[in-house]
Amino acid sequence: MPRVYMDANATTPLLPEVVEAMRPYWMEHFGNASSIHLYGQQAHIGVDRARATLAEFFNCHEAEVVFNSGGTEGDNTAIFGLLRPGDHFITTSIEHSAVIQAANRMAQQGVETTFVAPQPSGLIAPADIQRAMRPETRLISVMLANNETGVLQPVEAIGRMAADAGVFFHIDAVQGAGKVPFDVRRFGCHLLSISAHKMHGPKGVGAMFVRRGTPVESLLVGGSHERRRRAGTENVPGIVGLGKAAELAMHSLEDGTMERVAALRDRLEAGVLALPGTGVNGGGPVARAANTSNIWFDHLEGEALVIALDLKGVAVSGGSACHSGATEPSHVLMAMGVDKARARASLRFSLLKTVTEADVDYVLQVVPEAVEHLRAISPVAAGTAG
């Protein structure tokens, strides 16, 4: 039985080139990058090279790249490191839980948050961000690409608003990294977070862009690592792997790879939508990340369909991997105005950049079979048949 992985927004496998780049830093070049002897300097060179690559990836100065443990730490750093009691924070109701839960914790410290709702398409209207601003607004945080629908947010317009108002602007770019061209200067942000494992790099490592002069406090204190902006011995193999993944991601944005992925995503989507009682959450005229499609299947439970497809060798998701096993429907879809039944009946298909025509062919073979079978035995479907 073929096995097809279509849950890339949860995580991605390491590419062979990334493994090879990391390999020497587990064994031969194992030193502490802060040590001044040869072993330490060999490790330090690897970190410096990765930092130069990330600076190119972000379009920033090398001194503005901070390595960390991933997207959650980056999001938390922006919020906990900038906000103080009495400040006002603006974010959206479709953000990752790393932002939403951080905002909820800051509420206990006297920081009020405005959660801006999306339009039914999943798009955040810049005018709604503008209306939420107050004199005490200190930080705006908006994701670049939604992890469940793939909808791309108008971060450039929001960045201009933040600049005009003298407000700090953070972008959670975890799902956009490697899928859309990056340029922190064009985005107009002060901080931006990415995670390696969403772009064919290793788990447990990420990076932040921190614009020079941004007074963000470190979450971790101790040594003077990362110019005192993130204490802790550097994860050298992970950082090297992130650097290589970023290098490969830049190539993929230039060589037509993401256009190929988008074409296969569209073919997959069209094939699934040929089934009755289906539709796209976040489809229509809005721009999306090339690899993501969120599809609803009326008269089904999404969890049952995930299991049925897994038994046929196809891995998909009911939504964010951080909420797998949750009984509540997706907060993203609910914020978009999708009713609970349809939200529970929605699946996310997110394609790897190594996806093939054969992968899509197989998924289009097994999805109709699984849907037909589940609808035939579903009490929900049976209740609507009469």
Image (spheres, grey):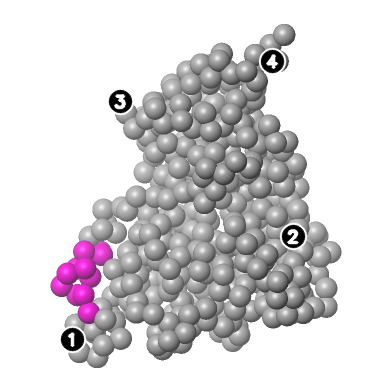
- Among the two numbered marks 2 and 3 on one chain, the one whose residue lies closer to the N terminus: 3
Q: Are marks 4 and 1 in contact (CB under 8 Å)?
A: no
- Among the two numbered marks 1 and 3 on one chain, the one whose residue lies closer to the N terminus: 3
Check disc 1 and give the amino acid type: Leu
Disc 3: which residue: 1
Q: Residue at x 52, y 42 (%)?
A: 325
Q: Cα distance, mark 4 to mark 1?
A: 72 Å
- Among the two numbered marks 2 and 4 on one chain, the one whose residue lies closer to the N terminus: 2
Q: Are there few (<14), some (14-19), or many (20+) residues within 10 Å of tag 4?
A: few
Disc 1: which residue: 38
Q: Are marks 3 and 4 in contact (CB under 8 Å)?
A: no
Which residue occupies the foreground of this view, 104 or 169? 104
| Image-based side of 19 in relation to 158, left or right | left
Q: Nearer the viewer, mark 2 or mark 4?
A: 4
Q: Are there few (<14), some (14-19), or many (20+) residues within 10 Å of tag 2?
A: some
Image quadrant holding the N terminus, namely top left
Q: State the SS at label 1.
A: helix
Q: Cα distance, mark 2 to mark 4?
A: 37 Å
Disc 2: which residue: 115
Check disc 2 and give the amino acid type: Phe
Disc 4: which residue: 383
x and y percent of residue 90 in the render?
A: 73, 66
Check disc 4 and give the amino acid type: Gly
Q: Are there few (<14), some (14-19), or many (20+) residues within 10 Å of tag 3?
A: few
Residue range in magenta is 21-31
| Image-based side of 101 in relation to 197, left or right | right
Name of the residue lying farthest toward the left: 28
Image quadrant holding the C terminus, namely top right
Q: Nearer the viewer, mark 3 or mark 4?
A: 4
Q: State the SS at label 2.
A: strand
Q: Are marks 2 and 4 in contact (CB under 8 Å)?
A: no
